[in-house]
Image (cartoon, rainbow, N blue to C red):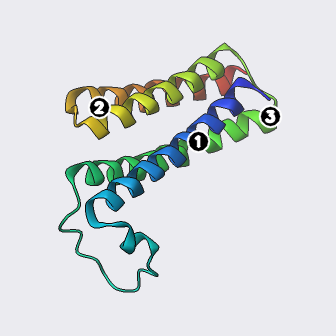
Amino acid sequence: MTIELWTLFGAAALLWIAILAQQLALDVAVGAQYALSNREQDHNFKGATRLHGRLTRTVRNHVEGLAIFAPLILIAAVAGISNIWTQWTAIAFLVTRCLHLLFYAAGITPFRSFAWAIGFFLSLGGFVFGLVIG
């Protein structure tokens, strides 16, 4: 398996971790009974914490990032392209997504935005360049 595919696996695992953290934060705030229910009735989440809100937004943001990242990785895999550009930008994407999750959960706004920008622009641009020269 290529480095790029491993980073896609890592990004999917990070999403799983973020979803788990989000659910655990909600369980702590409003109780596990809601999590175990069939959720047919709306819950007002008045007891939900700011951490749960930040984790919810992190999950949403990570899904959006994967919607861009995953096709690029799969295109490279199908085309048989793996070079220094695709490898390092895929690694940069995964590292910045990890940092983004940590900074967002902790509420560290400037660093969160910086990690997102690096992951989005550098990784996307570098990866597309790697595909073109590949």
* Residue corresponding to mark 2: 112
Q: Residue at x 52, y 29 (%)?
A: 94
Q: Would you say residue 12 is visible in this rendering?
A: yes
Q: Label 1 vs label 3: CA separation?
A: 24 Å
Q: Earlier in the sequence, mark 2 or mark 1?
A: 1
Q: Toward the viewer: 55 or 37?
A: 37
* Three-letter amino acid code of the residue under disc 3: Ala
- Vertical order, 103 against 40 (above or below): above
Looking at the picture, how far across and down is residue 79, in whole percent? 80, 34
Residue 64 in view (yes/no): no
Q: Residue at x 20, y 51 (%)?
A: 50
Cα gap from disc 3 to disc 2, whole angstroms:
33 Å
Badge 2 amino acid: Arg
Residue 100 vs residue 1: left or right? left
View extreme (left): residue: 46
Amino acid type, mark 1: Ala
**Cα distance between the residues tagged 2 and 1:** 20 Å
Q: Nearer the viewer, mark 3 or mark 2?
A: 2
Up/down of 38 relative to 105, above or below: below
Residues packed near mark 1 inside 10 Å, few (<14), some (14 to 19) or many (20 plus)? few
Indicate left or right for 49 with 128 as reference: left
Q: What is the x, y in percent for residue 107?
A: 22, 37
Which label was assigned to residue 13? 1
Identify the residue position indicated by label 3 in the image.
79
Q: Position of residue 123 (x, y in %)?
A: 50, 27
Circle 3 crowding by C-alpha within 10 Å: few under 14, some 14–19, many from 20: few
- Image quarter hosting the C terminus: top right
Precedes in sequence: disc 1 or disc 3: 1
Q: Residue furthest bottom?
A: 40
